[in-house]
Amino acid sequence: MKKLSFVIYHLSFSAALFVALQPVSAQEMTTDGYELVWHDEFDNDGPLNAADWTFEHGFVRNEEAQWYQEDNAFCKDGLLVIEGRREHFPNPQHGRARGWRNREFVDYTSACVTTNGLHSWTYGRFVVSARIPAFTGCWPAIWTLGQEDKGIYGWPNNGEIDLMEFYQVNGKPHILANACWGGTRTKYDGTWSTTRTPFTHFLEKDPEWGNRFHVWRMDWTEEHISLYLDDELLNQVPLSKTVNPQTDFFPVEGYNPFTKPHYLLLNLALGGINGGSLADTPFPCRYEIDYVRVYQQAPR
């Protein structure tokens, strides 16, 4: 918890400053030439601040099992709680949706909260403290998407950065750190820079890892996207390689989505392409976020 523990802030890639956190002020929250430009500490019980967060609704992507709704995200005791639930009710989109979304019933619910249309950033340091539900069937994530998300600038050409994903790879749990961009000449086929770290890697360090809060961090500069978990570098992506090719369906030369504004998403998906079976998932399951902080380099 933010008021009971210490959080690591990095002075360099090899050194760290430990700061005991009190109520946050922009003057206090500076590190390594960065200044705090936006944050949410989730200190007020109740719904999220509508000036900072929006919600996705319904069945959205990846053939996931959950119906996204606002009711499953709330602030309690200094945390944002995103709760996955087993529920059963008629699908409001049934008969109007296509493909896998045209299910007769909703059997699971969860939430995806975003800053889309409200806050976006180009470059900076993004820091998120969270405790994830490390269960089969759960697919929590911390990620960004390019704010240009319409027409030819839709996914994957707009770019995606995954500070964190947890899901099953070949039936075994992993934590992933990724970036995705157009990079191919096939529509809707992205180029990925992915690292998949077995969950056992973290359990060997701490058998109670899944019961604790951890700090995910992205350092995004004009040269690299660097993704960390508790000060361990998981993936580094050079921006020199993330240029979308010019094609018939993307007639823009030299477009790099990681030099453009991105917005933030926090979600708990259930099942779907990567989440795994929900047969043994304990419900309700909770994805808990202690804080989200965005820093950018101060003007020189």
Image: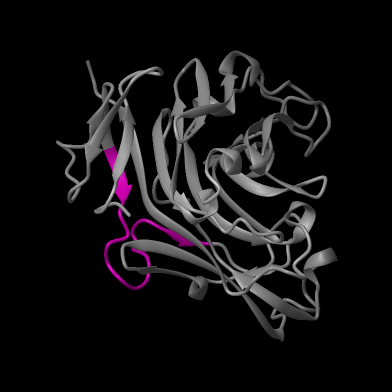
Q: Where is residue 186 drawn, in percent x and y?
A: 84, 32
Q: Which residues are magenta?
A: 37-55
Check the image and name the residue furthest to the bottom. 89
Give the overall secondary structure of the magenta segment: loop
Could you tell me which residue is drawn at 33 percent across and 63 percent down? 49
- Of residue 104 and residue 278, the one placed in the foreground of this image is 278
Where does the image place residue 240, in percent across and percent down from the top left? 60, 13
Q: Quadrant of the C terminus?
A: top left
- Tell me if 288 is positioned left or right of 111 in this view: left
Looking at the image, which is closer to me, 280 or 53?
280
Q: Can you give x and y, in whole percent of width and height, for residue 128 in the image?
A: 42, 44
Q: Which of 147/286 is in front?
A: 286
Please identify the quadrant where the N terminus is shown: bottom left
User: Is 40 colored magenta in this rendering?
Assistant: yes
Residue 149 seen from this side? no
Q: Is residue 57 above or below residue 124?
A: below
Q: Quadrant of residue 163?
A: top right
Q: Is residue 11 magenta?
A: no
Q: Residue at x 75, y 67 (%)?
A: 278
Q: Residue at x 50, y 28 (%)?
A: 232
Examine the image and state in which quarter residue 204 appears: top right
